[in-house]
Image: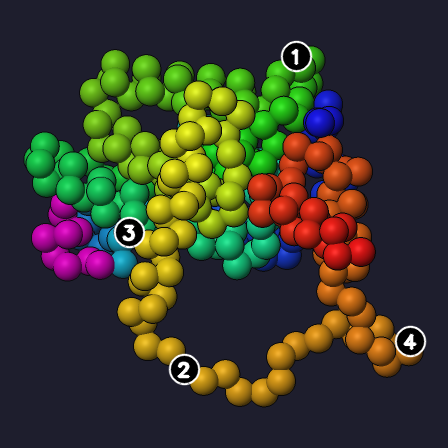
């Protein structure tokens, strides 16, 4: 089995949906940071950072949009500062660099589900921690979603190498493991239990989603039995939930892939095999999920 030995963004197209997400997040963050000190001076209750960040203050006032809105702004205590710019730029660079490859692999819809579900679930848990600890913190930023995307990146390209600081080659699995360890130490030492809980939930959502929905596996062999059981039980649970939901009849003919030059239907197995071979040539055989490998084996047997 071969793996990609280097990793760069040049070969990956930058998806428009990701570009829109980054532009929207930057715009909302900068506008709220710019207006916040001005509005605080005249209308302290209606400051953007206060209204859009996640807090017990907002929960007590039924501001139920905060589990979503806190992801679209970044903390800015005193307007636009150097720390604010660095935080925003760092998050958006990671989202653009890593998100493009993750989105390319799992699709736009699944990427948006991963990004927003991890952020919203993390916010709900953070609210609970705030209530238990009586914390008055105002939580802002898409850090839980960023870590969910990083975990998915590790599951997809565990053996890929990147140049840390453009000098040091390091595998993705060790880079992500190191980042998690550093963040854990900083959060615990500074007693930041709300942010620690939110990021931990983002990590768990990204890990479970990758295992259950896509049959990915982590690069650490000691977790393989657990991950196989998680995938199997997750699929069973999803099927039970799907059967409980009302079903609606589908209208129209099932979609087909057509060659416009001849008007004839294209064999979907051929399309799938071509896509998988292209993926292997780009990222190595290790980038294939268990489900994709099984389908390739079945197609080969039929032929």
Q: Earlier in the sequence, mark 3 or mark 2?
A: 3
Q: Residue 262 is drawn in which quadrant?
A: bottom right
Q: What span is colored magenta in the figure?
A: 56-64
Quarter of the figure with the C terminus: bottom right
Find residue 168 and name its label. 1
Q: Which residue position is annotated with label 4?
A: 261
Q: Nearer the viewer, mark 4 or mark 1?
A: 4
- Is the residue 107 above or below the residue 144 in the image? below
Q: CA distance from mark 3 to mark 2?
A: 31 Å
Q: Residue at x 52, y 51 (%)?
A: 111
The residue lying at 15 percent from left, 42 percent from top is: 128
- First in residue order: circle 1 vs circle 3: 3
| SS at badge 4 | loop
Q: Which of the two residues, 50 or 282, is positioned nearer the viewer here?
A: 282
Q: Secondary structure at mark 3?
A: helix
Q: Which quadrant holds the N terminus?
A: top right
Return the disc, 3 or 4, that comes first in the chain's sequence. Answer: 3
Measure the C-alpha gap from mark 4 to mark 1.
Answer: 49 Å
Question: Which residue in the protein does label 2 denote?
Answer: 248
- What residue is disc 3 on? 67
Which mark is nearer the camera, 3 or 4? Answer: 4
CA gap, disc 2 and disc 4: 35 Å
Q: Position of residue 231 (x, y in %)?
A: 42, 43
Instruction: Give me the residue at 33% from left, 20% from top.
Output: 184
20 lies left or right of 242: right
Quarter of the image for residue 144 reads: top left
The answer to whether 242 is drawn above or below residue 83 in the figure is: below
The one of 301 and 66 positioned closer to us in this rendering: 301
Q: How far apart, in angstroms, are the residues tagged by discs 3 and 4?
A: 49 Å
């Amino acid at each position: 089995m071969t793996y990609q030995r280097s990793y760069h963004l040049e070969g990956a197209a930058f998806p428009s949906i990701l570009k829109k997400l980054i532009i929207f997040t930057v715009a909302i963050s900068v506008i709220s940071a710019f207006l916040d000190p001005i509005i605080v001076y005249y209308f302290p209750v209606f400051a953007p950072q206060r209204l859009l960040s996640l807090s017990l203050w907002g929960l007590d006032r039924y501001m139920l949009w905060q589990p979503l809105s806190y992801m679209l702004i970044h903390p800015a205590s005193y307007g636009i500062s150097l720390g604010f710019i660095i935080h925003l730029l760092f998050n958006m660079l990671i989202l653009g660099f890593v998100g493009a490859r993750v989105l390319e692999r799992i699709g736009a819809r699944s990427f948006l589900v991963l990004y927003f579900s991890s952020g919203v679930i993390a916010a709900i848990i953070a609210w609970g921690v705030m209530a238990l600890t009586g914390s008055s913190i105002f939580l802002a930023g898409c850090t839980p979603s960023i870590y969910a995307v990083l975990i998915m990146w590790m599951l997809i390209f565990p053996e890929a190498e990147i140049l840390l600081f453009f000098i040091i080659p390091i595998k993705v699995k060790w880079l992500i493991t190191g980042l998690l360890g550093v963040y854990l130490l900083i959060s615990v030492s500074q007693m930041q239990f709300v942010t620690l809980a939110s990021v931990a939930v983002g990590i768990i959502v990204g890990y479970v989603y990758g295992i259950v929905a896509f049959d990915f596996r982590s690069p650490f062999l000691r977790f393989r039995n657990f991950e196989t059981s998680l995938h199997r039980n997750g699929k069973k649970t999803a099927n039970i939930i799907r059967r409980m939901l009302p079903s609606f009849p589908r209208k129209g003919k099932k979609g087909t892939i057509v060659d416009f030059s001849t008007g004839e239907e294209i064999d979907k197995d051929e399309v799938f095999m071509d896509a998988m071979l292209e993926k292997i040539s780009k990222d190595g055989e290790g980038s294939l999920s268990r489900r994709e490998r099984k389908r390739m084996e079945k197609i080969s047997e039929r032929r």
